[in-house]
Image (tube, grey):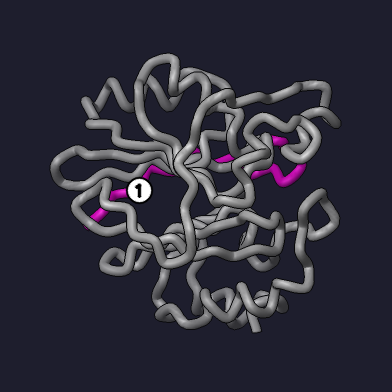
Amino acid sequence: MIKVTPFIYDDYDDVYANTYVLFDDKNNAVVIDPGKDYPGIVNYIKKYNLNFKAILITHGHFDHIRGVNTLLNEFKVPVYIGFDDEDKLTNVFTNGSAYFGDEVIIDIKANTVADNEVLKLLNEDIKVITTPYHTSGSVCFYLKDSNLLFTGDFIIPHSVGRSDLPTAMPKELRNSMAKVLALPNETKIYGGHGPSSTLEIERRVNPFVK
């Protein structure tokens, strides 16, 4: 089974996204959405001697990518992001950082991912589920055997992300949500902000999960 270490920022007004470190029983690890530019994730990887394999990005907003450069300065690993969000790595307007006076640029050649693509980075497959809505290139990462779903800002506890930002696709919410609703109720949801949840809970309390 895959273990998850969350780095959680509980304040919804804070412009830091949650970061997740996933690792298997052989210490192979990936980092999802390194949203804070600080050495905490680097120190964690080194402390536990993790075999760091890749950075996975749910979408290209600056609060989800701000820590990428810090990791790449220490580790030479590939970065995976949805095809339609790749441009946000270097566009400070579509990634939103220009509006906060903190221009974030990730000047790398990323690996773009497509719907139903399978990433073989850990000893359990990571399936890509494209969920355009919050951004045009938003994706979720799903680990079937461990019942884990990393949703970025597509689903956050009891709600969904905003749909009024550049490249948002509000009309795609229903189609994208249908893909998630096909997953088992016991699926644990790790969103980009706030605490974790489950699909069963979100079905009951989240008005957008219908």
Q: How many marks?
A: 1
Give, as a single range, the part of the protein colored magenta.
1-15
| Residue drawn at (52%, 45%) of the image | 81
Q: Amino acid at mark 1?
A: Val
Q: Estimate the x, y position of residue 156 in percent, counting from the top left.
A: 63, 60
Q: In the displayed structure, would residue 66 be above or below residue 82? A: above
Residue designated by label 1? 4
Please tell me whether the stretch drawn in magenta is mainly helix, strand or loop. loop
Q: Estimate the x, y position of residue 71 in percent, counting from the top left.
A: 44, 23
Would residue 194 be seen by someone viewing this image from the given angle?
Answer: no
| Residue drawn at (44%, 15%) of the image | 73
Residue 72 shown left or right of residue 125 in the figure: right
Quadrant placement of the C terminus: bottom right
**3 part of magenta stretch:** yes
**11 part of magenta stretch:** yes
| Residue drawn at (59%, 34%) of the image | 65
